[in-house]
Structure formats: structure tokens, C-alpha cells
Amino acid sequence: MSARLNRRQLLRRGTVGGGVVLSGSVFGALAGRADAATPSDNDLAYLRLLLAGELLEADFQVKALATRKLTSRARSTFRKMAADEKAHYTQLAQLVTTAGQTPATAGDIDFSYPRGSFASQSAILRMGAEIEKLVLGSYLGAVENVESAELRLPMGRISANEAQHVGSLAALRGGSVIGRAFAASLQIDAASAALDRFES
């Protein structure tokens, strides 16, 4: 991409052959599929949202590790989560590429964090937990709403791993590894609005 796009623009647009093509409103009527293998605009919007979430998690984890404020156990957890996010991103990016679009990369979005997010291990764990819960909720909303059955298993599998991240961060904060019996699901507009907080 020649110019940086904010995350909201990335949700609403896709690139095909180097040009920008509007995918249409995800909240309005959905365009029909060109064929059974082509994801709908709704599904592509969810894929772009989830990619943005993975990029946010990865960015936060890199910055958290760079602070040198984490204990050995916390550093190990953050490194494992970072490896997981990389694998999640690769899977989602492949799905977007297969659909003939270019996935967002770390260079496409500038993230920012509330003041004090990296001031101490406690602050880092608190913000990390908030981000992980946001992304988990986004995945659950996607599992609930995507039209393509082929996308549900990859999204469900990633959701399971994101839930492990939430539990691991809870344990580091002295809380219970096991959360609520029914994790919260975020609809795409709510997830998108929540991600806005982390945009520069």
C-alpha cells in the first residue's frame, strides 16, 4: 500500500491487484458471492478486523517485552503469546490472500496505548488482559456471524488459543485461570469501536 490506512479504513477496504476496492458497508446489505470459494463482504470484513486484532496483540507484546519490566515467568508467557499471534496472523493472512486481497501488515497501522500502559509489570498485564479479551470477543463474534462454514473452524481454533492467553494473563495477575462459563462475544461494530482506542 502506498499510503498508510487507519484500521477502520482497512476494515472497509480490500486491495486487489494493487488497487483499492470498496467492499461495501458490513452493516448494510451484503453483496452476493461471486462463487462458493469467494468470501462475502461480511466475512472479509471480519477477517480484516481479526487481522487488525492480531497486529495489535503482536505490537503490544513486542513493546511489553522491550520494557524489561516483566519477570522471567511473564516474559516467557509473552514470548509464547507472541509466537501464537504470529501463527494466527499467518493463517488469517493466507485466507485473505486466497480471497484475492492483500492482508494488512504491521506497517499499515500505527498503534498507541493509554498513558502508563507500560509503567510496570502490573500495568502491562492489565492492558495485555484487556487487549486479549477484546480480541477473543472479536473472534467469538466472527464465529457467530461469518457466513462461510469454512472460516468457522480456523476462527474457533484461534479463539480457543486466545482464551488460553486470557487465562495465562489472569494467572500472572493472581487471578483465576478459568474465567466465566460463557465468554463475551463482540459484534463487529463494537469490536471495531474498541479497537479505535488503540489507533494513533
Image: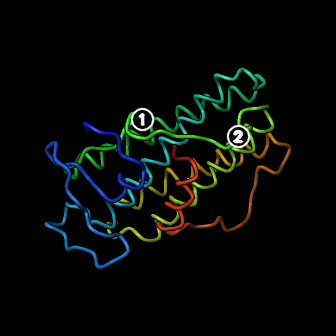
Q: Are marks 2 and 1 in contact (CB under 8 Å)?
A: no
Label 2 and label 1: CA atoms lie apart by: 22 Å
> Residue 74's spot in the image, x, y percent?
74, 30
| Residue 77: quadrant of the picture | top right
| Residue 81: quadrant of the picture | top right
Coloring basis for residues: rainbow
* Front position in the image: 3 or 102: 3
What residue do we see at 59% from left, 36% from top? 60
> Residue 104's spot in the image, x, y percent?
35, 43
Judged left or right of residue 22, residue 68 is right
* Amino acid type of the residue that numbered disc 1 sits on in the rendered structure: Ala
Seen in the picture, residue 118 relative to 175 is either above or below; the reply is: above
What residue do we see at 50% from left, 48% from top? 53
What residue do we see at 71% from left, 42% from top? 168
> Residue 49's spot in the image, x, y percent?
43, 55
Q: Which residue reaches farthest bottom? A: 29
Whichever of labels 2 and 1 marks the residue nearer the N terminus, that label is 1
* Front position in the image: 104 or 19: 19
Secondary-structure class at tag 1: helix
* Front position in the image: 98 or 65: 65
**Counting other residues with Cα less than 10 Å from the Cα at mark 2, is it few (<14), some (14-19), or many (20 or more)?**
few
* Amino acid type of the residue that numbered disc 2 sits on in the rendered structure: Arg
Which numbered tag is attached to residue 115? 2
Judged left or right of residue 135, residue 76 is right
Residue denoted by label 1: 106
What residue do we see at 27% from left, 67% from top? 24
